Image (cartoon, rainbow, N blue to C red):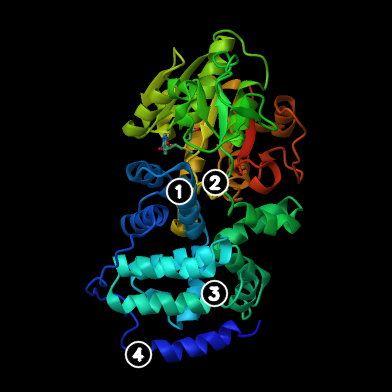
Amino acid sequence: MNDSPEKSRLETSKSMNDASNGAPRERRKPAARRSRPVTPSRGVAFDVLMAVMLDDAYANLVLPNRIKAAGLSTNDAGLATELTYGTLRMQGFYDRVIANAAARDIDTIDPVVLIILRLGVHQLLNMRVATHAAVDESVNMAEHFASLGAVGFVNAVLRRTSRHDLEDWQEFVTKDEKNDDSRLSIIYSHPLWIERAFRQALDAEGRGSELEKCLAADNISPRVTLVELPGFAETNDEVEGEPTTYSPVGMSLNTGGDPLRFARVRDGIVRVQDEGSQLAALTLSRHHDVVEGEKWLDICAGPGGKAALLAAEALAGGAMLTANEIIPGRADLVRNALKAVPGVEVVVGDGTEYGTAHPNTYDRILLDAPCTGLGALRRRPEARWRKTPRDVAELTGLQAKLLESALKALKPGGLLAYVTCSPHLAETRGIVEGALRKNAHVAELDAREALARVALQDVDLAGKDLSVQLWPHRQGTDAMFIALLTKSKN
Ligand SMILES: C[S@@+](CC[C@H](N)C(=O)[O-])C[C@H]1O[C@@H](n2cnc3c(N)ncnc32)[C@H](O)[C@@H]1O
């Protein structure tokens, strides 16, 4: 490095401590408009980042609408997606870079300016955008969306940033960190408590050495995978994809774009679904042969992804599925997800009370519990910044109650799958072990062996537990946890 970031910081603080640095918080008159418009992809990314930051919007919901409204070409849509998702994921790291290059606390920078800077830093450090283009386009955005003083500020901060590459910045912004956890949490842009939760879960499997790969996997967009509902979609030759690695009913899309362009997706017989979710549903439905007339329950069904697969499996085997969901609007989503599969009863109710109302009733139960979703961070780029350890405390209380209730609703000798899209030990082994301690008549079954019978290939599972923990960096799926429980007949 010719010019260390530290030196830049000093220079920056000198040059930026004048009155024309786009001082934060107070709204100024927008800068004089340039004739050059903001590029469509940057405009969409800016718009979505504003909605996420200021309106608590979800990027994965807002972005497709904004792309459509702006009429972006496929290439521009790809660029807008990379700008939005990449910036959101790496926000924690970029804020360290910006704070350093600007020599000021991030909280003192106007939100509009901060978003423009984060987008600029992403282009400079993680995309193959030429430096002059990244800086000029960001300055242009500042001229359109921010105050006059902010234009020079954006220009100066990004020029400082551009003097060093990603590795230099990684080294610099972590040089005072005392331990590996805080260093990795900054470099891979994960809040420290999440990084620690992943470390604990991997350590428990004896695979702590995979932590960096695990964190890195969250910063890459997954391929779109689809499930072909068994019995409905086998003859499908319209969707261009290839079989998924493990799921016998899955397909990975070869191309990007909106899967709704395929008629079978619109009809609901081919559905977007992570491969890990498919495996979770199949581990329950294919654990043993279905006996005609079996009663199945999906106790937390919304929005209905796994319910649709279970419904197809139930129909094929002569079982009857009930799908329960507490939020009426989400129960409507379940009904919509089930539009292609007849015969499913959808009910709205509190799953924690279900077992008391319907004791010893169901042969198979899926409890896909409300959870932190830490296993799907790669899909929800802003989620890592919104979750807190308090969410874990609240959710584990609910998960334990739901499991108690589901166990009550289970017929003696029946099979219950406890599933989370989180590898956090408190939400996974903690809940299962709590239920086993509390209920002498409940036993854990070997979910690994059950999964092995379902999966197309060997699944690399570590540790000694009977449950399954999938990982994005290992299986390319969301980090789904699957435990199988039964209760004795007497
Ligand atoms: C992880 S999601 C289930 C995802 C679903 N299995 C799928 O594949 O689409 C958990 C669901 O549980 C619902 N839920 C939360 N608390 C509940 C409760 N007390 N009773 C029933 N459902 C509940 C949430 O509204 C949410 O829709």
Q: Where residue 77 appears, x then y in whole percent?
A: 45, 46
The amino acid on which the numbered mark 4 sits, given as a three-letter code, is Asp
Which residue is denoted by mark 1 in the rendering? Answer: 76
Q: Does residue 11 lie above or below 325 as drawn?
A: below
Tell me the CA gap for discs 4 and 3. 22 Å
The first of marks 2 and 1 along the sequence is 1
Tell me the CA gap for discs 1 and 4. 38 Å
The first of marks 4 and 2 along the sequence is 4
Foreground mark, 4 or 3, reads 3
The amino acid on which the numbered mark 1 sits, given as a three-letter code, is Asp
Foreground mark, 4 or 2, reads 4
Foreground mark, 1 or 4, reads 1
Tell me the CA gap for discs 3 and 2. 32 Å
The first of marks 4 and 3 along the sequence is 4
Q: Does residue 472 lie above or below 326 as drawn?
A: below
Residue lying furthest front in this view?
Answer: 35
The residue sitting at 63% across, 52% down in the picture is 217
The amino acid on which the numbered mark 3 sits, given as a three-letter code, is Ser
Q: Where residue 342 appears, x then y in whole percent?
A: 44, 12
Secondary structure type for disc 4: loop
Which residue is denoted by mark 2 in the rendering? Answer: 376
Q: Does residue 383 lie above or below 11 as drawn?
A: above
Which residue is denoted by mark 3 in the rendering? Answer: 162
